[in-house]
């Protein structure tokens, strides 16, 4: 202790960073068990995942989601007996399921958008979708600013939007560009090339290159966005995906066939059987691994930390820096109960 | 009485020789949204590379592009017969975000060809009328949809009374056999529901054998044809013969294999057997319908009878009292020519009557 009395210094507004000292542990402490503790908690609470599918009717959206999650989670399987008429305006239909694997429960919500791109005049057909997404942010925001908050706010925000590109082999459609331009700032968009079994390997690779270039030229950032790569490891991994694999050319199926003694999901044609999970045939397995096995948590985090925060900041700004007043007449309109 | 050989049974071969010399004109329109394999199919059908130097514009360029009508001609010769094939393309159709009324330029184009023909027919020099009328429209339906889309229905309804429509399902290798059947049935149901009249392949003659009739009926059941096109000849597996097709990792689609797609059917019915019928229907039914509507609207500006598609004979058309209004010169010319025609026809009939009376055998005054 010093004899001199130091000059009184004003308290800093922001507390100084604590000095971090790297010390070597002299024995096993057990802090690495935090991973296990987190895992146990997650298993108990389960987690929410909300995935939206957008694209013209008939591109195999429902089938693909069912294939992704290996269960009938999307509205009715794609059978040709579907008598549903194309709706005149874009509808938003959310269906929730609880699926369980290895003790982990997931509350999966699939949000379908029938009617998108199907009319003669598709001007602004993305607006109901944008509205729905913002409404979920608004719901979450209202819960957050409550005085008595729920322990776990139900998360209905859209974590991932799969946008289905028609496999024309030429380039993106004007509608594709319009949609992605408007929505890439609001939600994580993962473009996929639907029904990719109509393209040869060459055609696929050329088409993908053209699509990537068009997206770049138009300033459309699909997930994983470059600006959110956290470290070098992320960047290299994501770069590879962004520049080589995406958009994933996928084929979906809910039928099984016998191939080489194994039962596989596929499509049987007179000229051969297309195996959904065969990487030589299509990139379904890549998409599945990407969305579910490696980037599921990241999708949720980017939605919460970036997209939701952007929405929140804008709302607060509009309200003069104050939390939004919950006025029932102004804000309670759900697009679909 | 001895049956003597007069010789007019040689008439068909005379006609044949004349038409071979004259050559054959055919105008085919191809329509449908982009990316359905239209150009590839045309190249496969006629085994020529008509679309060599085409460049498909990018999406951002297509945002503001309006529909254009492109024409390209090619002379094909086969077995001594020359065909001048004109292809009418409609790039931009169905591309834009807002496709309202995007079929109107196409309808206008078809009517313009009728207009042109009507003028030429009524003109002074009718020796070399260029027939630029569209004889057939191949309309491509997407295999990815659930049948006809609203845009398809709108286009077909605007066009079915003006041109022979043959609907085809493009890129049919996207579908499994059951899906193809279901889609075809759905389309047929929708066409019926929307009362769209597609080109009816005529019944085969009653004197054809059963096998032929069966094949013909089978072929007609496959409409709309599900087609696959390819500009490449590939070797399937290295051991079999080279075929026109598409090579995938899971197998090769053979364009000319009837188990794979209906390409052969389309080629047979369109090119090999019904080219002439398409021209005749265009002339006798569709053009006459247009002409009748046109002239009737001149005669009775208030009452436009559009429901009657029946062929109005030339005589009855000119019997409608035409009002003496200050009309454009071409209209006047049409009337003058019709008058002339009527007079000539009257003279012809008088001559025929005279000939019958004098019983001169073998004199035929047929107007070809």
Image (spheres, rainbow, N blue to C red):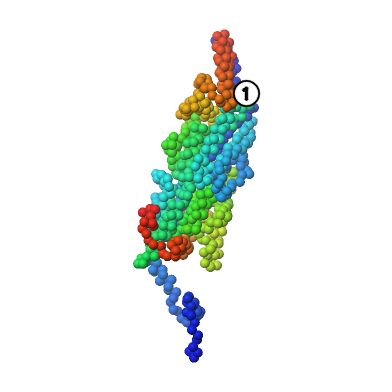
Q: Quadrant of residue B24?
A: top right
Chain letter for mark 1, please: B
Residue lying farthest to the top in this orientation: B358
- Please indicate, yes or no, whether residue A30 appears anywhere in the rendered image: yes
Q: In this view, does A267 lie above or below B81?
A: below
Residue ranking furthest to the bottom: A3
Query: Is residue B350 or residue A253 the one in the foreground?
Result: B350
Which residue lies at the image location 60% right of the left edge and 27% below the top edge? Answer: B120
Q: How crowded is mark 1: few (under 14 residues within 10 Å), some or many (20 or more)?
A: few
Secondary structure under tag 1 reads loop
Could you tell me how many numbered marks the image carries? 1
Q: Residue B242: x, y in percent?
A: 59, 44
Evaluate whether residue A292 shows in this view.
Answer: no
Residue B61 screen position, x and y as percent = 57, 48
Q: Position of residue B196 (x, y in %)?
A: 46, 35
| Residue closest to the eye, B5 or B186 | B186
Q: Quadrant of the C terminus of chain B?
A: top right
To which quarter of the image does residue B343 belong? top right
Q: Residue at position x 62%, y 32% from top?
A: B83
Residue A116 relative to residue A150: left or right: right
Nearest the viewer among A185 and B149 is A185
Front one among A155 and A224 = A155
Relative to B5, residue A172 above or below = below
Query: From the viewer's perspective, is residue A156 above or below residue B364?
Result: below
Which residue occupies 53% across, 63% down? A227
Left or right: B9 with respect to A307? right
Q: Name the residue under label 1.
A: B124
Residue at the spot x=47%, y=82% of the render?
A26
Q: Where is residue A259 in the image (x, y as percent from the top left)?
A: 47, 52
Which image quarter is the N terminus of chain B in?
top right
């Amino acid at each position: 202790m010093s004899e001199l009395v130091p000059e009184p210094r004003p308290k800093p507004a922001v507390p100084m960073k604590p000095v971090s000292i790297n010390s070597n542990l002299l024995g096993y402490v057990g802090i690495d068990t935090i991973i296990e503790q987190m895992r146990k908690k997650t298993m108990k609470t389960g987690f929410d995942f909300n995935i939206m599918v957008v694209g013209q009717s008939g591109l195999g959206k429902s089938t693909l989601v069912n294939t992704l999650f290996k269960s009938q989670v999307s509205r009715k399987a794609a059978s040709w007996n579907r008598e549903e008429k194309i709706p005149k305006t874009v509808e938003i239909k959310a269906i929730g399921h609880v699926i369980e694997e290895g003790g982990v429960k997931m509350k999966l919500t699939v949000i379908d958008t029938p009617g998108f791109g199907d009319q003669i005049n598709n001007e602004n057909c993305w607006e109901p979708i944008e509205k729905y997404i913002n409404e979920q942010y608004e719901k979450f925001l209202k819960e957050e600013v409550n005085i008595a908050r729920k322990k776990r706010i139900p998360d209905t925000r859209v974590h991932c939007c799969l946008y289905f590109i028609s496999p024309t082999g030429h380039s993106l459609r004007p509608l594709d560009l319009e949609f992605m331009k408007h929505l890439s700032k609001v939600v994580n968009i993962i473009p996929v090339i639907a029904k990719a079994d109509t393209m040869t390997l060459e055609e696929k690779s050329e088409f993908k290159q053209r699509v990537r270039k068009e997206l770049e030229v138009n300033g459309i950032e699909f997930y994983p966005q470059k600006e959110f790569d956290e470290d070098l490891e992320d960047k290299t991994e994501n770069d590879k995906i962004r520049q080589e694999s995406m958009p994933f050319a996928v084929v979906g199926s809910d039928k099984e066939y016998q191939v080489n003694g194994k039962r596989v999901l596929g499509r049987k044609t007179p000229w051969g059987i297309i195996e959904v999970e065969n990487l030589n045939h299509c990139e379904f397995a890549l998409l599945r691994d990407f969305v579910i096995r490696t980037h599921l948590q990241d999708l949720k985090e980017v939605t919460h930390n970036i997209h939701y925060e952007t929405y929140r900041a804008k709302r607060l700004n509009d309200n003069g820096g104050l939390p939004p007043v919950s006025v029932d007449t102004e804000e309670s309109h759900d697009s679909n109960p | 009485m001895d049956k003597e050989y007069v010789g007019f049974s040689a008439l068909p071969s005379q006609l044949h020789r004349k038409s071979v010399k004259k050559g054959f004109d055919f105008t085919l329109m191809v329509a449908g949204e982009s990316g359905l394999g239209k150009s590839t199919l045309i190249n496969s059908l006629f085994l020529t590379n008509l679309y060599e130097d085409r460049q498909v514009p990018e999406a951002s360029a297509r945002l503001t592009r309006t529909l254009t009508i492109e024409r390209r001609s090619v002379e094909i010769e086969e077995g001594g017969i020359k065909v001048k094939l004109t292809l009418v393309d409609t790039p931009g159709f169905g591309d834009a975000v807002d496709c309202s009324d995007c079929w109107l330029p196409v309808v206008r184009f078809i009517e313009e060809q009728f207009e042109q023909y009507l003028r030429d027919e009524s003109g002074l020099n009718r020796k070399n009328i260029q027939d630029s009328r569209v004889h057939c429209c191949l309309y491509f339906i997407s295999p990815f949809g659930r049948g006809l889309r609203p845009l398809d229905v709108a286009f077909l309804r605007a066009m079915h009374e003006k041109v022979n429509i043959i609907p085809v399902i493009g890129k049919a290798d996207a579908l499994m056999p059951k899906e193809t059947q279901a889609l075809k049935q759905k389309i047929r149901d929708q066409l019926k529901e929307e009362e769209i009249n597609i080109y009816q392949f005529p019944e085969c003659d009653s004197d054809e054998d059963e096998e032929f009739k069966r094949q013909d009926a089978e072929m007609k059941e496959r409409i709309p044809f599900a087609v696959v096109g390819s500009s490449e000849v590939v070797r399937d597996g290295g051991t079999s013969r080279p075929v026109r097709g598409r090579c995938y990792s899971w197998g090769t689609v053979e364009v000319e294999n009837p188990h794979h797609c209906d390409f052969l059917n389309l080629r047979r019915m369109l090119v090999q057997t019904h080219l002439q019928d398409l021209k005749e229907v265009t002339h006798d039914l569709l053009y006459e319908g247009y002409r009748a509507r046109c002239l009737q609207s001149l005669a009775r500006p208030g009452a436009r009878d559009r429901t009657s598609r029946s062929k109005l004979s030339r005589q009855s058309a000119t019997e409608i009292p035409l009002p003496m209004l200050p009309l454009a010169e071409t209209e006047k010319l049409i009337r003058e020519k019709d008058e002339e025609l009527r007079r000539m026809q009257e003279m012809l009939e008088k001559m025929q009557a005279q000939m019958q009376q004098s019983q001169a055998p073998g004199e035929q005054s047929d107007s070809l």
